[in-house]
Amino acid sequence: MRKYNSLDKALIIYVRYIVVAFVQSSPNRNKEGIIIIMDKLLDLTRDFDVAKAAFEVYLDEYDRADDKIHLKIVHTYGVVDAAEDIARRMGLGEEDVQLAKVIGLLHDIGRFEQIKRFDSFEPGTMEHAAYGAQILFGPEKMIRRFVKDDRFDSLICTAIEKHSDFKLEGITDERTLLHAKLIRDADKLDNCRVKLEESMETLLGVDEKGVGEGVIAPKVWESCMAKESVLSSDRVSKVDYWISYIAQYYDINFPETYEIMREHDYVKRIMDRVPYALPETQEKMDILTAEMEEYMDERIRNKK
């Protein structure tokens, strides 16, 4: 995945120099407009570095040694990388790529306070997405610590506020909708890695055997067979939580995201992490995995 190093930024400066020289030699060109565009592109590459440095300062308010805090720090940077990967595969412009990275960096900023207060990821303790949008765009305007340019405040706020909604609704602006979909995909994509790398005790409070001992609740299975995400309130056992992590991948917006998931064989690997005590549970997990992979492949084949 591409990172912008000093050589990349030097190249942008050089390109700007060439463009400026070109427009100055062409009296009919819109010199000011083109120069402003180049300056904004340069600012965007700077902005993410500034935002990242400010984010690291923000994290100093929390216990980085805490397993849940550490998980969310690693997840945040994983989402940044995932957002950039998806955006570049989609062929988005550089401004949208940089926007996607900034949104990825800040999307879970509310999680850290949730963990500090409640030591939990449960939605019943705090609506972390709404809280994150509130602290960033409330009266204190914490967003200015991370992004000096206010042109995209509404877009960034909406994308963060809605990134964990059960269903994405109520967005009419096309570009805002694009980024709201993109952060939801990037979040789920890195959560594939999380479900494979993090300890089960950190994720669900029990080991793999404990997760696999439960029975899948009827409402949870109905959602899976309807190719829908599972409502949090329908989950009863730890295995319900685990199967819901797979069912959420029906709510992916872009085939590029599915391409990455298939390249890493994420769904099968997540399913195989847990030993299921009951044959009927194992059978249902096999069915869900097969149907999910078929669904992903169809979405990839139908990619426009």
Image (cartoon, rainbow, N blue to C red):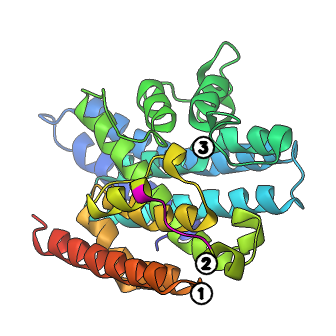
C-alpha span from label 2 to label 1: 6 Å
C-alpha span from label 3 to label 2: 34 Å
Image position of 151 (left or right of 59): left
Inspect this view and state whether residue 186 appears.
yes
Instruction: Indicate the position of residue 137 as horizontal and vertical percent values.
Output: 59, 22
Residue 232 drawn above or below residue 29: below
Magenta segment, principal secondary structure? loop
**Between residues 151 and 131, which one lies in front from this camera angle?**
131
Dot 1: few (<14), some (14–19), or many (≥20) neighbours within 10 Å?
some
Q: Which residue is mark 2?
A: 212
Image position of 200 (left or right of 178): right
Inspect this view and state whether residue 4 appears.
no
- Looking at the rendered image, the disc whose residue lies closer to the viewer, 3 or 2, is 2
**Secondary-structure class at tag 2:** helix
Instruction: Indicate the position of residue 151 as horizontal and vertical percent values.
Output: 43, 26
Q: Is residue 238 magenta?
A: no
Q: Which residue is mark 1?
A: 275
Image position of 273 (left or right of 246): right
Instruction: Indicate the position of residue 23 as horizontal and vertical percent values.
Output: 23, 43
Q: Which residue is mark 3?
A: 106
Q: Which residue sits at x=36%, y=43%?
A: 179
**Between residues 177 and 23, which one lies in front from this camera angle?**
177
Which stretch appears magenta? 214-218
Residue 76 drawn above or below residue 262: above
> Looking at the image, do the residues carrying marks 1 and 3 touch, with CB atoms under 8 Å apart?
no
Q: What amino acid is found at the position of numbered circle 3 in the picture?
A: Leu
Instruction: Indicate the position of residue 201 as horizontal and vertical percent values.
Output: 77, 70
Q: Earlier in the sequence, mark 1 or mark 3?
A: 3
Residue 158 drawn above or below residue 219: above
Q: Earlier in the sequence, mark 3 or mark 2?
A: 3
**Secondary-structure class at tag 3:** helix
**Secondary-structure class at tag 1:** loop
